Image (cartoon, helix red, strand yellow):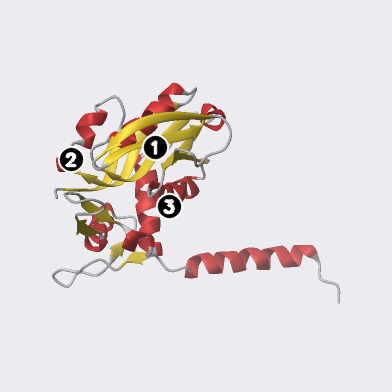
Amino acid sequence: MTVREENVVPVAVRERRKIARERPEIVISAPQEDGEGPMTASDPDTVSTRLRAVARTYSDFPVPGVQFLDLGPLYADPVLRSAVGAEIVGRFEGEFDAVLAIDARGIPIGTVVAVTAGRPLLLARKAGKLPGVVDSAAFALEYGEAVLQVQRADLDRAGRVLVVDDVLATGGTAAAALELVRRSAAAPAGFAAIVELVPLGGRTRLGTSVRLEAVLSVAL
């Protein structure tokens, strides 16, 4: 028996609508108080609460005197990881054309942000990791010095660039990445971090010339 096309299309459309209706709402199982149930992943209070719960701090790593904030459990949680990326995208909605993720721990969340927003992903990597013509910026860490590099040609074509890292501490890494953007033909759209360590003064160092957003701000 011959099946006419006009009889097939409506069935396919109805089937897609059925799937969309049955798709469950994604939730984060955040710590519950007073019998409250889980909240949606798009709720910033739930995201920050869950993020605070999974973050781990290690003393004297990588050198004595440094408090190291480990966000490994965040990256291991697909729902929370996606929610954090969506939160960052939402705060800069329509304000950036590309994402510049900072090596190394800013690359996973930068990737999530770029994919969520449907924007190109560029990398700011440590010295010697990128081929071709690169631009470099040196910066000081809490426990030493380092150099960030970008592939200049790609950055020149990027337009408005959102710089993304996992943690804002003293602001040295962020300042170096933003400097590389300003040297190029692109323009900084802002800086986003998963966590801001407030006492270390990174926000003050970056100043008010660029918009800064953190999903969670903590005092060590």
What label sits on residue 163 in the rendered view? 1
- Which circle's residue, 1 or 2, is located before the other in the chain? 1
* Residue in the image at 40% along x and 48% along y: 104
Foreground mark, 2 or 3, reads 2
The amino acid sitting under disc 1 is: Val
Residue 112 screen position, x and y as percent? 44, 51
Q: Mark 2 points at which residue?
A: 200
Above-or-below relation of 39 to 168: below
* Residue in the image at 25% along x and 26% along y: 208
Residue 51 screen position, x and y as percent? 26, 58
Mark 3: which secondary structure? helix
CA gap between label 2 and label 3 equals 23 Å
Q: Residue farthest to the right?
A: 1
Mark 1: which secondary structure? strand
Residue 204 screen position, x and y as percent? 20, 31
Label 1 environment density (alpha carbons within 10 Å; few <14, some 14–19, many ≥20): many
Label 3 environment density (alpha carbons within 10 Å; few <14, some 14–19, many ≥20): some
- Which circle's residue, 1 or 3, is located before the other in the chain? 3
CA gap between label 1 and label 3 equals 13 Å
Figure quadrant of residue 191:
top left
* Residue in the image at 33% along x and 60% along y: 72
Q: Quadrant of the N terminus?
A: bottom right
CA gap between label 1 and label 2 equals 19 Å
The amino acid sitting under disc 3 is: Pro
Above-or-below relation of 27 to 219: below
Q: In this view, does 93 lie to the left or right of 16?
A: left
Q: In this view, does 11 lie to the left or right of 119?
A: right
The amino acid sitting under disc 2 is: Leu
Q: Name the residue under label 3.
A: 108
- Which circle's residue, 2 or 3, is located before the other in the chain? 3
